[in-house]
Amino acid sequence: MSASRTVDVAVVGAGAAGLATAIFLRRERPDASVLVLEGAQRPGAKILVSGGGRCNVTNREVGPADFWAPGSGFVRRVLRALPVDATVAFFAELGVELHEEELGKLFPDSNRARSVLEALLREVARQGAELRCGARVRRLARAGDGFELETSWGTIAARRVLLACGGRSLPKSGSDGLGYELARSLGHGLVEPTPALAPLTLAGEFHLALSGVALPAELSVNAAGERPRRVRGSLLFTHFGVSGPAALDASRFWHRARLEGREVGLQVSFAPGLDLAAFEARLLALGRERPRLGCLGALTLRLPASLAGA
């Protein structure tokens, strides 16, 4: 089907950002026509797979340091405009109550990502924004005071365009880098992207026998030219290396340093909050109290036995 339309605002992408954008636009400007264009046949694919299918909506604490440019005034303005409490209230208004889990993660009480997507879609419809799936944008160009979008659904004229296409994290969901191409076509400069939440592969065979072992840890990414970046959280050993929240959160610093050609190393502490001297002091004290325990026995008191043995 082809069509020719003129709208006030075209939102490219019907993921969490695109759907929320449409909702807030219509709430602020109910007289504006808002059209959400989604290239896939169904919206919200990444919402459905996030948080292991339960959708980690947000965190209890979100600050500028959680973003790539922590000193950016833009980041601070965005966080002030929609702080965590306002986010929680927004979803409660949509009928999605949230609860807090480990490390401050906020999940829907239903523990179903689909309930989050369905609530957003209901509110988009209630606010009067139009959602069109199967409408992949092929070209975006300036046209007079607005823009022209050539899509698989037809040509659309829009006074304003918002790109909410996602990155390149999950191409089969639609996050295949289209947004970068569209932004560049309009003359925007971009910071070269790197993976931000990726597992880390390890050389050697140390980790092979530990596959499936998870425990609290602190990762320190030591890149030349900057202070160490420390990340705490659960670490999961896998057949290829390490995953889990700690590894995923640390990966952006590793990848950025590698992209920029800087030397980078990774250290892990299985005693978060203790430095090497403090941990050694505890082991020595334990050795004095229980001299027959041995090094392996002492480590097993703090670590999974398989990890202590390795």
Image (cartoon, rainbow, N blue to C red):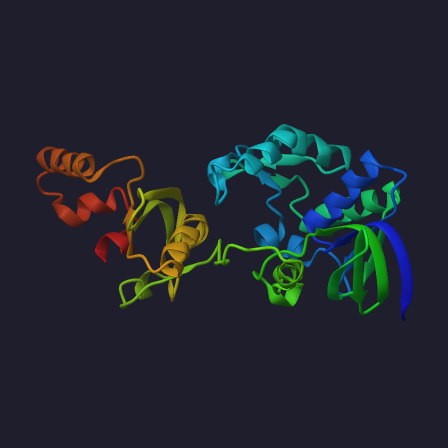
User: Is residue 229 shown above or below 289?
Assistant: below
User: Is residue 70 shown above or below 85?
Assistant: below
Left/right of residue 141 with respect to residue 266 in the rendered view: right
Taking the image as drawn, is residue 134 in sight? no
- Quarter of the image where one finds residue 5: bottom right
Left/right of residue 302 with respect to residue 41 in the rendered view: left
**Residue lying at 67% horizontally and 29% vertically, measured from the top left:** 86
Residue 303 percent across, percent down from the top left: 28, 46
Residue 55 percent across, percent down from the top left: 62, 48
Residue 13 percent across, percent down from the top left: 72, 56
Split into 4 quadrants, where in the image is the N terminus?
bottom right
- Quarter of the image where one finds residue 23: top right
User: Is residue 85 shown above or below 4?
Assistant: above
User: Is residue 167 shown above or below 160?
Assistant: below
Residue located farthest toward the front when viewing the structure as drawn = 144
Split into 4 quadrants, where in the image is the C terminus?
bottom left
**Residue lying at 9% horizontally and 42% vertically, measured from the top left:** 292
Q: Nearer the viewer, residue 155 or 88?
A: 155
Looking at the image, how many numbered discs can be counted on the residues?
A: 0
Q: Nearer the viewer, residue 163 or 24?
A: 163
**Residue lying at 12% horizontally and 46% vertically, measured from the top left:** 294
Left/right of residue 2 with respect to residue 199 in the rendered view: right
Taking the image as drawn, is residue 2 in sight? yes
**Residue lying at 61% horizontally and 32% vertically, measured from the top left:** 84
Q: Nearer the viewer, residue 27 or 310?
A: 27
Residue 39 percent across, percent down from the top left: 75, 64
